[in-house]
Image (cartoon, grey):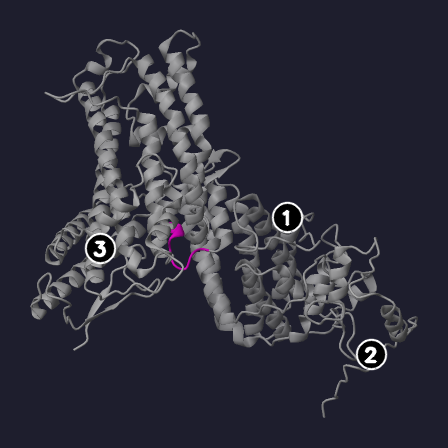
Amino acid sequence: MQQQFDPLSPPNISHPGVVATDITRKFSSAVKTLAPGELVKDDHFTLFESVAALEVMDPKMDSGVLAEGESLDQEYDVSRDLLPEEILGIIDQLLCLEMAWHQGYPLSQTLFTSVYIESLMKPRPTNIDEADFVRDSQGHEKQPKFLFVLRAYCLGLLKACCFVNELVKEELYYEEEDFVTNTYDRNLLFDIPLASINSLLLKARSDLRLASNDVPKEISTALELRLELRIAFLRAIDLASLRRNNPDSLKMPWTQMSGLIEHIKKQHELGKPVPEAFSTKLQRRLASTMPPRPMVQPSFEESYGQFKRLFQDGVDIMDVLKYTEPQSLLNFVLLFQARKPQPLVYIRTLLQSMICKDMIVLGSYSIRQILDHDLSIVVLPCAPQIDRSYDAIEVPTDPRHQISAQMEIFRQRVAECYLEIFRIFCQNRCRVRRTLCHNIQEWEMLQGDVEEIDQLLQNVLDEKPLAITGGDPINFSLPLSSWAYVYKLRQMEWIVQLGFELEVYQTDELAGMYWYLNYLAKTRAQHGDRIKTFTMRSLNEARDGLAGSGDQHLPQYTAAKDREYMTSVAYLRVTMLDAACTWEFADGLCCLYTALLRLNLIAPPQRPYSSDTLRYDLRMKPFRNISLPALPTFDEFTRATLQPETATHDLLKYAENAVGGARKGYEALSRMSEAQAFSANTHGRWVGNIKDCLRAAIAAGVAVSTLQRAIERAGGNEGQGPLNLALKVEMPETGKGYHDWWIVPKLVRTA
């Protein structure tokens, strides 16, 4: 029978050296002498101590509280004899705890609950020989025969965690939200060289093979494969830090681990769990102010799936080093980080490290090389502004020296903002959108700053405005500010599109937000057309020999220059087609959702503390300080969204044409080659993304035609009152639609 506990009886405190004194009566008497409201405070009794006093003896807050008969420390003996099957079971549980840590749980609830891990780290070892479960030589001689396998595995595990932890801390991540880097005063074998750990793992593998006659073959093979996994993991981490190696060679350990984890999964049933080798009591030894928390123990099946994805992501990420041009690099990052489920934090920080570490991009390129290459593609093909030979001119009055000096100022101003885009997309999806909202403010200021540089260069280059026949001159090219404007517009579109993916908008708000996306995409297409106009002028002048006829410093037109111009024209073609597809599809969905609202197939929820104006201010808050493109007023936004002058029949006809145009555009995009789409090393994912958009466009066309037929069946006209359409709207679940950025409703007949 369970012992009854009387909360009024004094606790049983019995321990050698402890003399307990009951002060209850003295305390009660002292309290009675106080007047109501009077407080007694010791100046040395701080807020921290007062909160700690409240936590004392609370099992949920006090890590030192003990149940009746419970000991303070874990009494598990790390030198106990273990069967090979038990060693296998402990290793598999460590695998699960390692993956829980990768998923964002702290070490205190995962790996640091292992008695074996704790015995390796405390006391802190200074060399590989000290890193053992038992530190005295006599105890070491009495260790079980096969404990060397567990020791080698645990040391390899800790060293891998050390590398992962250090890498994550060096890159952009969000503490407690993505990953917990706190090691609780444990150094994860930071001071022990990797070579020593590798040597120990190789020796353990060799010794295991020599002792294979004493162990069942399947158990021996299973233990060996787990040692192989640790060796491969450490080699993958070590090679990834080099960055300059052949990407295919960097893939080899990741590919090896993908194969090993498959065999490990099949061997899991051979292991025998040892639950007593793990305990949350070890949290009492950690340097932490957190209350005790339960151990996080994911299932082996779940951990296997996560490891499988981790290793495949490790294989795929190495393709980023196969650099061709910046637009493909950007597409690689965008598409890789958008995959479902999103890569783990270690992979995302590894990608950040590979893209730019120590101011070297992809391990081989300077930031200037990447920026100039991007400028040559987007706005400045074959332009003197990015001619490296101008750097050698030292005469201050020489125009080439002035151009070089101004471009260096430009690069210093934009380099960090440019690389920040790549870093931002290596975050979790919620953080991507939130950070982009701040980043566009920086690009707004950047655009104004570089426009001043444009104007200075315009005078140095003696640029002539572009005139249309029979019309007025249409400004100057302003290539640097045009380049900044392109990226600002793209980031604004991404913010709105991620809002659809993250369910930021309510169903009745979709019409308005799709209209605003249409507005941004149309602006980007128009700006792309402007850039193309100046690019074609430059191309025609170069082909006609004008580029070098009056200036001996400007090179003549060559085949290499022609390829550079054609690359720029190809980029403008694909980006304008992408913008056109976005604006057409967004326009079609805007009209469809407006029609559904008119027909009461979508009902706005009750919002007693909200209004349309307040909601508009909230949704447009990220864009409020952006001067160009100008933010529409609430009245303009409402009128453009609701289109009160347009009949529902005409609205649906317009939606049908717009969605049809988007479908044709996506079909054209899906047929583009890797070079045409600027999707080197990620073309498969790029085509898959376009095809998902195409399927969403087809589904939108079906929804529009279904609504049109329902209206025809009902025989309704404008102004005749509500129609009985016998339809209901089904919204796709998050992540279950054709594409996360295109929320297409499904219309289902109810009768």
User: Most prominent secondary structure in the magenta stretch?
Assistant: loop
Question: What residue lies at 71% left-to-right and 72% top-to-bottom?
Answer: 59
- Which corner quadrant holds the N terminus? bottom right
116 is higher (above) or lower (below) than 483: below
Asked if the residues shown at circle 3 and circle 1 are in contact, with their CB atoms under 8 angstroms apart, the answer is no
292 and 720: which one is in front? 720
Cα–Cα span, label 1 and label 2: 54 Å
Closer to us: mark 1 or mark 2? 2
Q: Residues within 10 Å of mark 1 (few under 14, many from 20)?
A: few
Which amino acid type is shown beneath numbered disc 1? Ala
> Which residue is label 2 attached to?
11
> Which residue is label 1 attached to?
195
Q: Tell me, for residue 589, which label it has, or none.
A: 3
Where is residue 113, by image quadrant? bottom right
344 and 154: which one is in front? 344
Q: Is residue 256 left or right of residue 24?
A: left
**Residue 726 visible in the picture:** yes
Which amino acid type is shown beneath numbered disc 3? Leu
Closer to us: mark 3 or mark 1? 3
